[in-house]
Image (cartoon, rainbow, N blue to C red):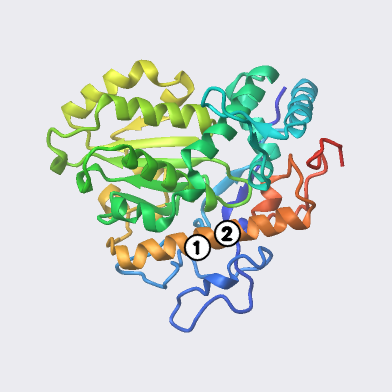
Amino acid sequence: MTAIPEASPASAALIPPTDGPVKENGSVNINDLHTSAAKLSIAENATVDGSTDPVKTPFINPSSTSQILTAAALTADQTAKYEKVLTTVSSWTTKPSSTPNSPAIPITDSDRMWLTRDCLLRFLRATRWSVDDASKRLLATLTWRHEYGLESHTPEYISPENATGKQVLLGYDIGGRPCLYLNPSRQNTERSNKQVEHLVFMLERTIDLMPPGQEMLSLLINFDKKMGGDRPPLWQGKMCLNILQSHYPERLGRALVINIPWVVWTFFKLINPFIDPMTREKLKFDQDLRQFVPPAQLLKTYGGDVNFTYDHEAYWPALNELAAKKRAAMVERWASAGKKIGESEFYLRGGEDGAATNVTNGDGQAT
């Protein structure tokens, strides 16, 4: 019988130390955000620049009312399967190219760091604990991440796509999941693959802002009346679904959709056959979102209390600098623990339980 996971306050996962991160104007010194998770001096619902009414930059931490559930312990069978996948991925020195007759691509430190214990378990759960399928999908995703150019999609490159705030990463839901808002009525560019790159970029930043113990996100979509008859083309919807389901498995905690016009219902019906059943269960339509997101971190346009004004010149650099600092802190912790495949994301994100023990170094030797 599986034990019921215990809840822990999301605010215990937090980054700032007690000495130094808060400026006199209430804003935060981003250079200090990654130094310690042990003590807090950040006010409830504080933003990067100290803005409150209106809010213009991301919230630093989840609400104190948010609760991150502790994952249930693995069974003996699940542990054995995880160890088999860990052994397999630890033996990789290259990843294949998707271009026929092209040379294999060397595995990088970035690849090794991505292959965390939690990542391997997400792919195992997504493949119903098939060691072979999980290993194949992990390798395919390493190839995809390289060839899609994730690390070359800079904030400057993506910036024009978000100039109107059609995607906003702000706040956390009741489970400590970062909230990514999609606002289709603010569409400002022609249909292209760059719109999909924009979504992937924002998914990566959402992952950057996850607190220790949380590996999922909440997606909030508001199809307000301004959208009219416009909708994404079917090919674009299928591409986004394929990327999410193939390369970001077990990342979606909830998808909260409101103000759905008939034309969007038609679109959902068209792509419904391509949606994984487990993903479909996470979709919630036209519900009171205050039951899923603390009102103090939920936008007013979604039924919350946050008066948010999108100012690209304030929001965009604040988001990307915050995400970059958190990524840098994770890289530093990963390096200091020995650059091991199978490292704990809880540890990398600032958790105080120390580095993982069931890990390997780059040559596949257990440590």
218 sits left or right of 124 in the view: left
Eyeballing the image, is 112 above or below 354? above
Name the residue located 14 percent from the left edge and 43 percent from the top edge. Answer: 226
Say which element carries label 1: helix
Say which element carries label 2: helix
Which amino acid, mark 1? Leu
Which amino acid, mark 2? Lys
Q: Quadrant of the C terminus?
A: top right
Report if the CB atoms under discs 2 and 1 are less than 8 Å apart: yes
In this view, the residue in front, 68 or 212, is 212
Q: Give the image quarter of residue 260.
A: top left
In this view, the residue in front, 194 or 117, is 194
Which label was assigned to residue 8? none
Q: Which residue is mark 1?
A: 322
Q: Mark 2 packing: few (<14 Cα in 10 Å), some, or many (20+)?
A: many
Q: Which residue is mark 2?
A: 326
